Image (cartoon, coloured by chain):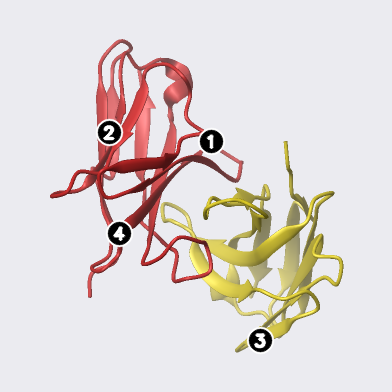
Amino acid sequence: NAGVMQNPRHLVRRRGQEARLRCSPMKGHSHVYWYRQLPEEGLKFMVYLQKENIIDESGMPKERFSAEFPKEGPSILRIQQVVRGDSAAYFCASSPREGAGYGYTFGSGTRLTVV
Amino acid sequence: GQQLNQSPQSMFIQEGEDVSMNCTSSSIFNTWLWYKQDPGEGPVLLIALYKAGELTSNGRLTAQFGITRKDSFLNISASIPSDVGIYFCAGQPGGSQGNLIFGKGTKLSVKP
């Protein structure tokens, strides 16, 4: 039973390029949460999605960031026109039900570096 | 916004010693979770707490959810070198749909 799979593990982008981060939830999990972690900081919630729906995007920057979780395929976090301040580790977590107490499992993250 | 204050920020201990760390908040949380993060990896769940006053153990780890639902502690007994890492507390606020608020972490170093 594979865990939450994120790819790529490391991503380098030049300023102004687009970054696409993928997250495949655990089998049977239809709830996906994305978090961002800056160096020496805790994780900060960005967005919560269920299949084909964005449930809570209160932590997403209003511009350049978008997320989707299509009926088929992984969840995608997309950052357009990246800037140096977007450099961080991005983690997704999946859960079989809404709520953090039901086997909420994190992936190993994607480390984005903007040069 | 809601915040979790985690302390201490870092700890340097000798192998075999016991460790205690805690988290406080000015807000009430429904669920408290303790995670460990190794370098280059995602957080791994150690203990989940659901009820005020709940005391839960997982091997050498013990955690308690405060009566007021505004604090929690994590104890590690008889530390070993593989306990090294960053420990995070996280809380699910009332009314949220599963998003967590994380503390800034306690970095634990263990000297053999």
Callouts 3 and 4 in the same chain = no
Disc 2 is attached to a residue of which chain?
A
Q: Residues within 10 Å of mark 3 (few under 14, many from 20)?
A: some
Callouts 4 and 2 in the same chain = yes
Residue type at tag 1: Leu
Callouts 1 and 3 in the same chain = no
Mark 4 = which residue?
A30
Residue type at tag 2: Leu
Q: Percent x, y for residue B73?
A: 77, 69
Comparing labels 2 and 3, the label whose residue is closer to the camera = 3
The chain coloured yellow is: B
**Residue located at (54% from left, 74% from top):** B82
Residue type at tag 4: Ser
User: The N terminus of chain B lies in which quarter of the figure?
Assistant: top right
Task: Indicate the secondary structure of the residue bearing disc 2.
Answer: strand
Residue type at tag 3: Ser
Q: Residues within 10 Å of mark 2 (few under 14, many from 20)?
A: some
Mark 3 = which residue?
B57
Per the model, the C-alpha gap separating discs 1 and 3 is 30 Å
Disc 3 is attached to a residue of which chain?
B
Q: Determine the colour of chain A.
A: red
For residue A38, which numbered disc appears in the image? 1
- On screen, residue B61 versus residue B54, left or right, reads left
Mark 2 = which residue?
A11
